[in-house]
Image: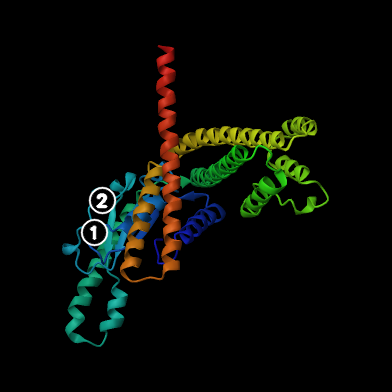
Amino acid sequence: MAGTRDIGQDDVHKKSIITNIERHFDSVSAVLILADGIVPRVTTEMEYTFAALASIFPKNLVNNVGIMFTNVRSPSSWRVSQEELPGALKNAPLFVLDNPLALQNRYNDDPDMRGIVKVCEQRALETLVKLFDWLDGLEPQPVTEVVCLYEKYRNIETKTTNTLAQIDQVLAMKGEINKCMVALRKNSTVSVSTVLAPRLESHVRRTQGAGSFSSIDNTANMTTWEQLLTTTHKIEKQVFVEDTNRRCEMVKDEKEKTTALIAINEIVVHNLNQAIDRATNDLVQLVEEHGRSSLSGGFLDQLGSTIRLLEQRYVDMENNWAGQFTLQERKKGLDDVKRKLALLNSAKENAQKDSVKHQEILG
């Protein structure tokens, strides 16, 4: 986790962890998180890793999670505090270890280092005794909670991504409506074929692949207005489009047709906004359920730690004179996570306001 590759790889790791647990175990006795102890404090990478792992493990494992810091040569100089750990991990037992086998291989022929190797061996044995004492006192927990929590985690990720895509669709369609309005003001006899069709076809091609629109190339034998209606048919409810078709068949004037198209787009925007409202309400419930069930205590906290990690990496890359393309890709990834956090925070705030209004109505 938190390697040099894109954080998308960490999602692969999390899925692999849950998949292997589900396939090979009926219960989980312990989760031991290994962390590099060379740095004597919790770094941004560690904070992100702890938060990411805590987000996929349920609270029934709160007493079954331990953390082992490796490569700790001198425990007296190691200053990691449990208060620096996220959520329920603040109470997790901490173990420190410096691999004695590595020292043996490195200093096997150096008599001056034999004493240091012996001390390392003794400390490693003491750590292992503490570790197994802790393991002996644990109660295994069923894997069903682990799998269920991960499904909630994935649902939040998927629904958040889809909702942001819908928001982008609304913004794009509002832009098209504004263009149509400007055209109507400039020319009361504006032609649909010369103004609206190219813009809509361009929008179709830009959004093709996102599951929002279909190409209108297969309607080459239709009139431009029929093509527009066919495309609208792809994105609107059948009953509304049929009603709109009957209306537009009676419309002869190009200006009225343009006005009708604006009305169609406005209703599509309205329906998309309603879908966004429903999705954000669902997201609030999912995030709350996840927060009640996970060790992390909140999906938003995990996004916050992800943003801090990505911001640090972006600054590091800037300081190391990374290429412009690489920086742009990193910046896009950072902005995507920020948009997710902003969406969830906004949904949470709106839900709280609605709750207050509901209480005021009830008196």
Q: Residue furthest top?
A: 363
For residue 229, the mark is none
Q: Is residue 24 visible?
A: yes
Q: Position of residue 56 (x, y in %)?
A: 45, 48
- Residue type of the residue flagged with mark 1: Arg
Q: Is residue 35 visible?
A: no
Mark nearer the N terminus (1 vs 2)? 1
Which element type, helix, strand or loop, lies under badge 2? Answer: helix
For residue 84, the mark is 2
Quadrant (top left/top right/bottom left/bottom right) for the N terminus: bottom left
Given residues 361 and 324, the one toward you in this image is 324
State how far apart marks 1 and 2 are (Cα). 8 Å
- Residue type of the residue flagged with mark 2: Glu
Q: Position of residue 241 (x, y in %)?
A: 74, 34
Given residues 195 and 124, the one toward you in this image is 195
Horizontal arrangement in the rendering, residue 212 relative to residue 305 (left or right): right
Given residues 12 and 132, the one toward you in this image is 12
Q: What residue is shown at x 69% (from left), y 39% (from top)?
A: 189
Q: Position of residue 8 (x, y in %)?
A: 48, 59
Which element type, helix, strand or loop, lies under badge 1? Answer: loop
Horizontal arrangement in the rendering, residue 102 relative to residue 202 (left or right): left
Badge 1: residue crowd in 10 Å (few <14, some 14–19, many ≥20): few
Horizontal arrangement in the rendering, residue 25 relative to residue 255 (left or right): left
Q: What residue is shown at x 32% (from left), y 54% (from top)?
A: 47
Residues under numbered marks 1 and 2 in contact, where contact means CB atoms less than 8 Å apart: yes
Quadrant (top left/top right/bottom left/bottom right) for the C terminus: top left
Residue designated by label 1: 41
